[in-house]
């Protein structure tokens, strides 16, 4: 896939604090994620992004939709499975499609690709896998908050966002996505 090999991205995984937030078991989230698998694969292929990475983001952001109320999360500031930021001071995006639709997945993936490309421009000396991880961190907090690879998550939610998403994506990749 054009943005790097998710299986070659180094990760320390989620922090203990993030892991304990998951009320559902990993197997339950994976079971629910299978409902979205065909749409995730289509969207990943359309954007040349590993579908396992999209699944990893969905798992972290919305726990496969289980953390949402009426499609909304983050106290009404984010929309859908991929939690597209709608706040004017944040992403300022207009939600596209239903919260669990393929249209929404396209929007979230386009935002992810945008940030991977921004990190590629900002850090041309990083490997493709480092740029991919930096783009994942930027999806959470914006590219202006990514300052170095060694501390890529220093400003992310839980200070572990990209490490957690990568670990989840690697799990999904190893389990059929």
Image (cartoon, grey):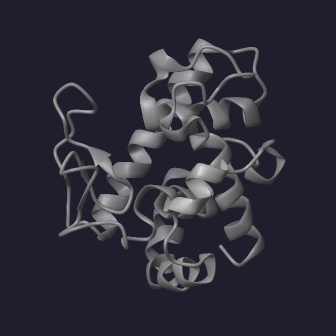
Q: Is residue 110 left or right of residue 165?
A: left
The image quadrant that residue 4 belongs to is: top right
The residue that appears at 48% across and 22% down in the rendered structure is 143
Depth check: 19 or 141 in front?
Answer: 19
Q: Is residue 2 visible?
A: no
Give the position of the C terminus as an image quadrant. bottom right
The residue that appears at 56% across and 39% down in the rendered structure is 136
The residue that appears at 62% across and 82% down in the rendered structure is 27
User: Total marks drawn?
Assistant: 0
The residue that appears at 67% across and 29% down in the rendered structure is 131
Residue 150 picture location, percent across and down = 75, 22
The image quadrant that residue 53 belongs to is: bottom right
Depth check: 126 or 27 in front?
Answer: 27
Residue 112 picture location, percent across and down = 47, 41
Residue 161 picture location, percent across and down = 57, 42
Measured along the vertical axis of the image, is residue 52 above or below residue 123? below
Residue 8 picture location, percent across and down = 83, 47
Q: Is residue 83 visible?
A: yes
Depth check: 50 or 16 in front?
Answer: 16
Depth check: 52 or 48 in front?
Answer: 52
Measured along the vertical axis of the image, is residue 118 above or below residue 76? above
Q: Is residue 74 left or right of residue 60?
A: left
């Amino acid at each position: 896939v054009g943005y790097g090999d998710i299986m070659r991205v180094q990760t320390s995984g989620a922090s203990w604090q993030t892991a304990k937030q998951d009320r559902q078991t990993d197997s339950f989230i994976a079971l629910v994620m299978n409902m979205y698998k065909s749409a995730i694969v289509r969207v990943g292929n359309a954007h040349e992004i590993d579908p396992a990475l999209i699944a990893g983001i969905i798992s972290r952001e919305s726990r496969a939709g289980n953390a949402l109320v009426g499609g909304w999360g983050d106290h009404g500031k984010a929309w859908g499975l991929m939690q597209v930021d709608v706040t004017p001071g944040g992403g300022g995006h207009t939600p596209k499609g239903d919260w669990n639709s393929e249209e929404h997945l396209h929007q979230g993936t386009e935002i992810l690709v945008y940030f991977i490309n921004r990190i590629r421009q900002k850090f041309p000396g990083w490997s493709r896998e480092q740029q991919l991880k930096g783009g994942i961190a930027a999806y959470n907090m914006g590219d202006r908050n990514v300052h170095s690879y060694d501390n890529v998550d220093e400003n992310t939610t839980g200070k572990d966002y990209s490490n957690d998403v990568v670990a989840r994506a690697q799990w999904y990749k190893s389990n059929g996505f």
